[in-house]
């Protein structure tokens, strides 16, 4: 099993913390976010780790030289998004894959639940998301995305603008798994897409990950929701760090 960490983003909403460092190197409880992520992967037995870099990539590679890490650089990080960064690592997509954003931290329990889930395409969903969102912002509904799950535990809808809390059965945390048995199929599917199916900023290269997952659901295969109850944090703004710097993961 391989881990792919998507760490190309600039983190503009975290300035000045990201003026001289990539977003994933911002400190949380004594060490950079990226170190938390890699240490959790290693603790759970995933030692084959690929980091997709972008902004300030030289600094990140130097920082991580003590780890056994392979780096892939997204040279177009300024004009692309998460999906594009993931497929920059396409040459590494030949095994079971766990994909993680680089601005989150999560417990080994959260990761183990994902690893042990035997479905082919699995997305980690926090059903207790609202408490976290309410601690970060005044109106969680403005920032949250739809999440509809059927009775069998498969996602019906993800990533759209909700009209009410009734449309939100959980929130995607930026962590998912693709089985080796379907990796080639997912790669072919990605390359079959075009701007005509992508409404994110009108640019295929800027497609959001949730939009890609929704397309997988609609056109390729079922996607399973691995339900969790907290056990993770996301850092998107300066306020996030201030409010959660002393937070203990459940």
Image (cartoon, helix red, strand yellow):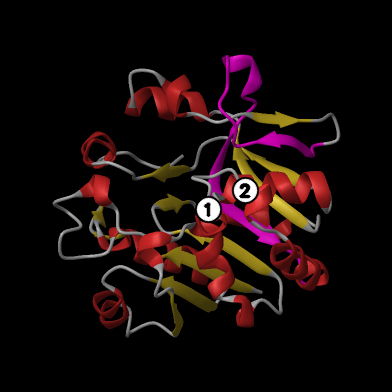
- Residue 105 x %, y %: 42, 52
Q: Mark 1 points at which residue?
A: 203
What residue is rendered at 38% in x and 53% in y? 103
Camera-side residue of 135 and 211: 211
- Left or right of 68? Residue 2 is right
- Residue 56 x %, y %: 26, 71
Residue 12's place in the image compared with 74, above or below, is above
Camera-side residue of 238 and 83: 83
Q: Give the range drawn in magenta.
A: 153-180
- Left or right of 172? Residue 180 is right
Helix, strand or loop at disc 2? loop
Confirm whether the magenta stretch covers residue 162.
yes
- Left or right of 230? Residue 54 is left
Confirm whether the magenta stretch covers residue 139.
no
Name which quarter of the figure residue 80 lies in: bottom left
Task: Return the disc, 1 or 2, that comes first in the chain's sequence.
Answer: 2
Q: Name the residue under label 2.
A: 198
- Residue 221 x %, y %: 84, 52
Q: Distance between the residues labelled 1 and 2?
A: 7 Å
Camera-side residue of 96 and 247: 96
Residue 222's place in the image compared with 102, above or below, is above
What residue is rendered at 71% in x and 42% in y? 225
Asked if the residues shown at circle 1 and circle 2 are in contact, with their CB atoms under 8 angstroms apart, the answer is yes
């Amino acid at each position: 099993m391989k881990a792919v960490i998507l760490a190309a983003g600039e983190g503009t909403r975290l300035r000045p913390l990201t003026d001289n460092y990539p977003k994933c190197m911002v400190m949380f409880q004594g060490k950079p976010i990226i170190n938390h992520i890699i240490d959790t992967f290693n603790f759970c037995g995933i030692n084959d780790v690929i980091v997709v870099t972008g902004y300030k990539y030289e600094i990140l590679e130097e920082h991580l030289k003590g780890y056994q890490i392979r780096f892939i650089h997204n040279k177009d990080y300024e004009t692309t998004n998460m999906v594009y960064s993931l497929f920059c690592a396409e040459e590494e997509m030949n095994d079971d894959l766990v994909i993680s954003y680089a601005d989150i931290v999560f417990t080994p329990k959260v990761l183990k639940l994902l690893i042990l889930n035997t479905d082919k395409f699995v997305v980690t969903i926090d059903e207790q998301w609202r408490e976290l969102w309410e601690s970060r912002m005044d109106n969680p509904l403005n920032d949250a995305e739809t999440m509809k799950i059927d009775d069998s535990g498969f996602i019906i809808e993800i990533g759209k603008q909700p009209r009410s809390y009734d449309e939100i059965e959980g929130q995607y945390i930026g962590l998912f798994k693709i089985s080796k048995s379907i990796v080639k199929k997912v790669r072919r599917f990605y390359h079959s897409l075009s701007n005509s199916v992508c409404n994110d900023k009108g640019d295929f290269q800027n497609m959001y990950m949730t939009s890609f997952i929704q397309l997988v659901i609609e056109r390729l295969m079922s996607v399973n929701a691995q339900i969790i109850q907290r056990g993770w944090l996301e850092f998107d703004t300066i306020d996030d760090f201030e409010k959660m710097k002393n937070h203990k993961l459940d």
